[in-house]
Amino acid sequence: MGIHSSQDDKRCDTHDAMSVAIKIMISDPPTSEVVHRFRNFGEDIFHLLKDTCSVNIEEIDKATDNFVVRGIHRRDLGLVTQTIKRELKKHHFDGSASLVRL
């Protein structure tokens, strides 16, 4: 699983040219168990990355198959990506997840 750039998506943090966003998507069917697990994953991402970049807990609480981590400084991109991948594996989404750099 790698980060893919999307030509169609616009940068979410347009006021800061030095930051990027990553959209985290899963392809699992949105059963209640999967949605619950995905939101738990999102809450872990929120707690781990809230001091490094912008993670919206309200977006995570409504998420069924995707959410966006915004305001990632380019110097932190590797750390943020590693953290997301580690947590995806911990929550058993490493086989069904895609990360798209916006």
Image (cartoon, helix red, strand yellow):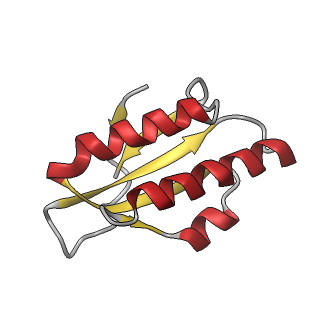
Q: Is residue 83 above or below residue 19?
A: above
Nearer-the-camera pick, 52 or 94: 52
Residue 60 appears in the figure = yes
Nearer-the-camera pick, 57 or 19: 57
Left-right relation of 5 to 24: left
Residue 6 appears in the figure = no
The residue positioned 56% from the left and 69% from the top of the image is 57
Residue 88 in percent (x, y) is at 54, 36
The residue positioned 49% from the left and 53% from the top of the image is 45
The residue positioned 70% from the left and 53% from the top of the image is 64
Nearer-the-camera pick, 64 or 33: 33
Residue 26 in percent (x, y) is at 61, 39
Residue 32 in percent (x, y) is at 86, 48
Left-right relation of 74 to 9: left
Q: Quadrant of the N terminus?
A: top left
Residue 50, quarter of the rendered image: bottom left
Which residue sits furthest right? 32
Q: Is residue 34 above or below residue 49?
A: above
Left-right relation of 20 to 40: left
Label tally? 0
